[in-house]
Image: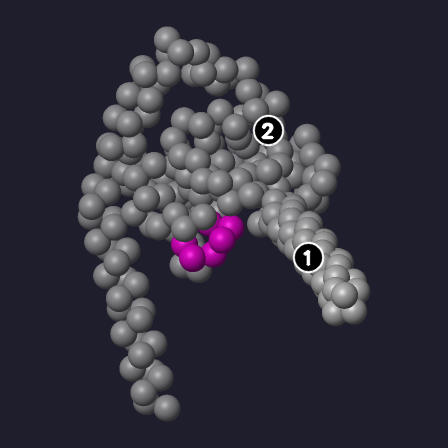
Amino acid sequence: MLSAVVIIPAIFAIMMMMRHSLQSHRSLQILRHSSSQKSNAGRNSTSRSVLLFPEQMNIIYDSKCGICKLEMNMLERRDIRLNGTATGGRGRKLRLTDIENGNYDPTDPMNGGVTYAQGMAAIHAVLPNGTVIEGIPVFVKAYDLVKLGWLFRFMEWSIMKPIVNWGYTVFAKYRTIVTRGSTLQELIKAYDDKKKLTCDESCNNYFKR
């Protein structure tokens, strides 16, 4: 009888302690899960809010193509006339990057990983969040940003899209022959050879030190 009087309260006390411990463990798990969700949300929010550049798009173009250069100059002049020379905020909307510039770096995040071969085969643009677009959508967005979107709006019509895309594909295929007197393959080979020569010279200069 005495043992029952001692054991039963002891068992009850142990059960209450276990229940309290389990509740505490569950509360801790919930707290950790909530904290993890907030941390992930914060990281996702930060990653979305980080912009590669202040303008609204970076157009990668071929400055040695006369037609391309004229068009980029026109867009740049209009952009400056509408938005001034400052960048970011209410400043300029367009950033222009010359793929023929000797310092062009496809690994720069602002250039979206667009290689020389890709950039010469079709016009590309990078958006501030890193999204890369190419072909007709580049012109549609660029002209829209300088308030000339109506010129390209018909290209968005479903009946016109296939025709416009086909037309640009044909133009892009023969563009370098018409505007630069060389095939795309010849220009890419010349570019690669030049890069290789520059690399070889850099390596030789390094080992001569």
* Residue at horizontal 45 percent and vertical 40 percent from the top: 132
State the image quarter where residue 133 is shown: top left
Q: Which residues are magenta?
A: 105-111
Looking at the picture, which amino acid does disc 2 mark?
A: Leu
What percent of the width, then of the height, locates residue 2? 78, 69
**Residue annotated with mark 1:** 22
Closer-to-camera residue (180/170): 170
- Secondary element type, mark 1: helix
**Do the residues under discs 1 and 2 have CB atoms within 8 angstroms?**
no
Is residue 82 at all visible to an observer of this figure? Answer: yes
State the image quarter where residue 93 is shown: top right
What percent of the width, then of the height, locates residue 113? 41, 51
In this image, 186 relative to 31: left or right?
left
Closer-to-camera residue (155/48): 48
**Residue annotated with mark 2:** 145
In this image, 72 relative to 99: left or right?
right
Q: Residues within 10 Å of mark 2 (few under 14, many from 20)?
A: some
Above or below: residue 67 compared with residue 1 = above
What percent of the width, then of the height, locates residue 117? 29, 47
What percent of the width, then of the height, locates residue 41? 65, 47
Looking at the image, which residue sits at the far bottom? 209
Position of the N terminus, as image quadrant, is bottom right
- Closer to the camera: disc 1 or disc 2? 1
Closer-to-camera residue (72/26): 26
Above or below: residue 207 compared with residue 15 = below
* Residue at horizontal 25 percent and vertical 50 percent from the top: 188
In this image, 153 relative to 184: left or right?
right
Position of the C terminus, as image quadrant, is bottom left
